[in-house]
Image (spheres, rainbow, N blue to C red):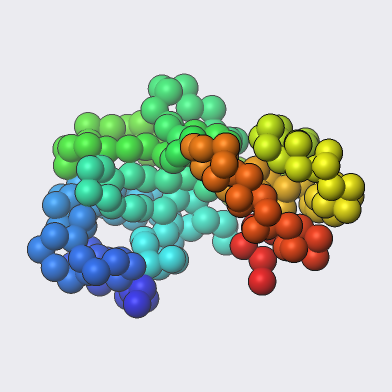
């Protein structure tokens, strides 16, 4: 069960895995670094909350950053990160399907202290956008389809009509899922499994 008390995160963990409240929890290993990130965020006059079991920091009613800890690193992730100028080139992508670099990743507990000036500058920039209410325009461009999906749509007019009627976001949900499969046969199998959902106008996680 995910935590709802902010102090629990720094003492016990997020509550999202079996390592919660054990010595193996990632928050234990990165305790000093996480405390450093927390101190920087609080000193930037951000409002501290808990969202999705993690410390989340807000300004002007907008999420600014969220803290996370993993076995091999801990990180400070920015919301609306594509707005940031990133003059120091420190932002990294969460994964291969992440559209924009949006996090600062640390592999040393000393990292936040060493990067304190940069972190503060990025937080101030993000706060400014929150006050302005500035957001990125929605990307409505069509996603590039995997070869197996193109072939399936060409062979199945009903499926093709239904897929192209989906919102861009729902189309992308299928593309991301299919691109996550390494083997062509796995992608083909997933397309067959997804057919009914697509016909019903649902996204990959729709019910």
Q: Relative to residue 50, is residue 180 depicted above or below? A: above
What x and y, as percent, mark residue 181?
52, 42
Please name the residue shown 47% across and 22% down the image: 87
State how many labels appear.
0
What x and y, as percent, mark residue 108?
18, 37
Please identify the quadrant where the N terminus is shown: bottom left
Q: Quadrant of residue 45?
A: bottom left
Please identify the quadrant where the C terminus is shown: bottom right
Q: Is 23 in front, or is 56? A: 23
Q: Quadrant of residue 143?
A: top right
Q: Quadrant of residue 60?
A: bottom right
In this picture, residue 70 sits left or right of residue 50: left
Q: Is 83 in front, or is 206? A: 206
Please name the residue shown 22% across and 49% down the image: 71
What x and y, as percent, mark residue 103?
42, 39
Q: Is 120 in front, or is 142? A: 142
Residue 98 visible in the snapshot: no
Please name the residue shown 88% across and 53% down the image: 158
Residue 50 visible in the snapshot: yes
């Amino acid at each position: 069960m995910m935590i709802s008390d902010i102090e629990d995160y720094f003492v016990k963990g997020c509550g999202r895995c079996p390592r919660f409240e054990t010595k193996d929890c990632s928050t234990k290993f990165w305790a000093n670094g996480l405390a450093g990130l927390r101190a920087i965020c609080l000193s930037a006059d951000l409002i501290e909350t808990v969202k999705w079991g993690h410390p989340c920091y807000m300004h002007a009613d907008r999420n600014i950053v969220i803290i996370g800890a993993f076995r091999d690193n801990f990180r400070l992730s920015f919301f609306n990160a594509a707005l940031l100028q990133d003059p120091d080139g420190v932002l990294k992508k969460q994964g291969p399907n992440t559209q924009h670099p949006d996090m600062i990743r640390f592999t040393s507990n000393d990292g936040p202290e060493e990067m304190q000036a940069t972190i503060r500058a990025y937080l101030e920039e993000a706060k400014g956008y929150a006050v302005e209410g500035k957001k990125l325009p929605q990307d409505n461009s069509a996603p590039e389809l995997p070869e197996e999906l193109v072939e399936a749509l060409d062979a199945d007019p009903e499926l093709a009509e239904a897929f192209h009627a989906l919102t861009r976001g729902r189309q992308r949900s299928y593309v991301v899922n299919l691109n996550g499969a390494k083997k062509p046969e796995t992608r083909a199998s997933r397309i067959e499994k997804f057919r009914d959902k697509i016909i019903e106008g649902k996204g990959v996680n729709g019910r």
